[in-house]
Image: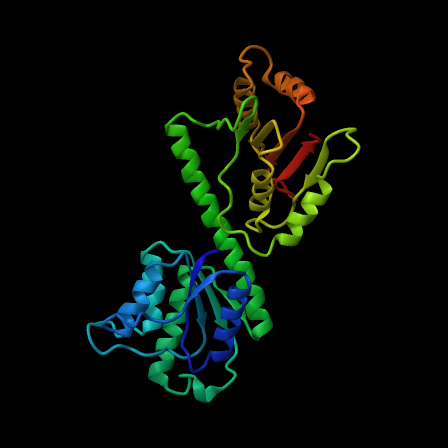
Amino acid sequence: MARVYVSSTIADLEAERQAVIDWLVAAQHQVVHSYRPSSDTVRDGCLADVETSDLYVLIQGHRYGFQPPDDNPEGLSITEMEFRRAGQSGIPRVALLRTSVPNIRLSDMENPERAALVLAFRAEVAGAVRAAEFGDLRGLVQELSTGVQGELDKLQAKRAELANAQAERVKEPVAPVGAGRVVRLAPRPVFLVGREDLLAELESRLADGDGRGPRLVALHGLAEAGKTSVALAYAHAHLGREGITWQFAAEDPAVLAAGFAQLAAALGEREGDPVAIVHRALAAAGGWLLVQQHWCRSWRPGTARRPS
């Protein structure tokens, strides 16, 4: 579950705002979209809430919004302040830009001065992030779901990278979980929503069968679609039943070879061909799970598991 700040003007985007909130709630995220009563001003409360969020979502129409008269030399609207504050705080931003004007009376497009503000803000957003455009509520939700999951996957990958770097600094790339068991995995995904059916299918395909050989599943799709997060969620859920659980980066032969050497060392074998050592160990092991990450034209990553 992520804490998500929803930013927009209100009068012209009421239905869009509610659709975004409804989707986020259904996805079990915590929605932030109001200021704290204890704050001195609406602006202070909004900006403080932005800074405490994991993710920022902007719905942008054709209305500029309220411009606080005090302590605002640039004459920015609260919505534009929120967008900038999220960027300054390093919070991932998802921008959803409405292409049509359903009700011109609720927009600023008939007022040349305010229309210029709207267009300048839209240009700022388009220049700062990869904004998604929508024309109706259905398109809005489609772009929202893609954008949110993509940003959360990036955030999870960044946290995993930091955790791995920290482990490397303390020379603990391998985490022993119990006697005779070795594990190397990125941390369990913090954010994983809308993938329950895929996880259930993965469970079914990798369930114990006739024991004639390892079962293989390839997760494939567009970049940042959450494939690695799904594989890691499955792996962490089965740590208690596998003797060997290991994650390989396989896109570079040298990195893959180093991964085999690390696993062979973790198994207590430092002499000989690491690949052959690992193969012998897997053949003798009561159960194992390998997660292989590989960038190519069609898939990343795959998983292979033999029965316990």
Q: Nearer the viewer, residue 91 or 232?
A: 232
- The image shows residue 66 at horizontal and vertical percentages of 32, 79
Q: Position of residue 220 (x, y in %)?
A: 65, 46
Q: Judge whether 102 appears above or below 222 on screen.
A: below
- Tell me which corner region of the image, top left, top right, bottom left or bottom right, holds residue 253: top right
Q: Is residue 52 above or below residue 103?
A: above
Q: Is residue 181 above or below residue 42?
A: above
**Image location (x, y in percent) of residue 248:** 57, 31
The percent coordinates of residue 156 (x first, y second) are 47, 47
Residue at the farthest top position = 271
Where, quadrant-wise, is the C terminus in this rendering? top right
Residue shown at the point (29%, 72%) measured from the top left: 37
Q: Left or right of 200: which side holds 60?
A: left
How does the figure colour the protein chain or chains? rainbow
Q: Residue at x 37, y 87 (%)?
A: 111
Q: 125 above or below 11?
A: above
Q: How many marks?
A: 0
Quarter of the figure with residue 298 = top right
In the image: residue 103, left or right of residue 235: left
Q: Residue at x 34, y 58 (%)?
A: 52
